[in-house]
Image (tube, rainbow, N blue to C red):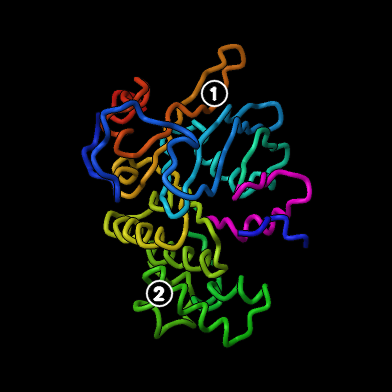
Amino acid sequence: MSDPTMSGAGPTVSPRRIGAAPQTAPQRGPAGIDGPTVFDIKDANVFYGAFHAVKGVNFTVVKNEITALIGPSGCGKSTLLRSLNRMNDLIPGARVEGTVSYHGKNIYDPGVDPVEVRRRIGMVFQKANPFPKSIYDNVAYGPKIHGASRTERDGIVEDSLKKAALWDEVKDNLKKSALALSGGQQQRLCIARTIALQPDVVLMDEPCSALDPIATARIEELMVDLAKQFTIVIVTHNMQQAARVSDKTAFFSTEVNERSDTRTGVLVEFDDTQRIFTTPADQRTENYVTGRFG
């Protein structure tokens, strides 16, 4: 992967591809990675003006794994997720301190193009947000802007819809409005639109929160399949979902500033998903995954 500057214990569900938890103390951070590192986050702090939203986050994201961010509302999960592709740049007063390295390059270094960062690190949002265009045009929009020919776009649309497990449902109605699709289909269309630009990473911010159990199951199956080609980071409030689909889990909580009555998100524990849900190292994690708080 070239430089992005581009000069221009609770649930007992077995997580995917994770075996029995070793009895030794869990390793954390870079020493515990299992493959090529995509993100190496070191002492990351996120501010909105004077408000310290997320404090001192350290963890790594490994290629072709699913990393889940869990924790109670207001603990900074989505804020941290948006920091991974500089979406917070769009919020006045937001800033990130520390290091967010992507393939060894700090994406917040001067000269790094945030637009190129967002192309390589795509985002799927909590609520499906298809454009008021046809199914075809939704998926072809990004490639068209980047200069793909009509023939190239045809291939990209078909390939992306197949990868999003939607092609068989819409292939005969590509000119149909995307807004006529069901909620689950719209979310899969948004995933297809994201991967049409061939990103390296797909960030997902509670992609199933507005979906019924059947549509949720389809998205979860899709995530596991997509992880063969993409690296995925997901924010979820559904602990069973994190246990079912993720390889690594980061548990966030909050610290309360009694003087200002504000809450700052902190990373409590990051480890293999199975360890987080069966033998967590921190009592706060155990309390959360067993439902004692949160």
Q: Is residue 107 magenta?
A: yes
In the image, 40 versus 242, the foreground residue is 40
Q: CA distance from mark 1 to mark 2?
A: 42 Å
In the rendered view, tell whether residue 16 sits above or below residue 215.
Answer: above
Is any part of residue 290 visible from this angle? no
Residue 270, position as x, y percentages in the image: 43, 33
Task: Check disc 1 and report its element: helix, strand or loop.
Answer: strand
In the image, 240 versus 26, the foreground residue is 26
Q: Is residue 150 magenta?
A: no
| Mark 1 or 2, nearer chain start | 2
* Highlighted magenta segment, given as a residue range: 102-124
Q: As drawn, is 47 to the left or to the right of 288?
A: right
In the image, 272 versus 156, the foreground residue is 272
Residue 113, position as x, y percentages in the image: 73, 55
Residue 200, position as x, y percentages in the image: 54, 59
Any mark on residue 162, and which? 2
Q: As drawn, is 163 to the left or to the right of 125?
A: left
Q: As drawn, is 244 to the left or to the right of 127?
A: left
Task: Check disc 2 and report its element: helix, strand or loop.
Answer: helix
Q: Which residue is mark 1?
A: 263
Residue 164, position as x, y percentages in the image: 41, 68
Identity of the residue drawn at 49% across and 29% down? 267
Q: Residues within 10 Å of mark 2 (few under 14, many from 20)?
A: some
For badge 2, the amino acid type reads Lys
Image quarter of the N terminus:
bottom right
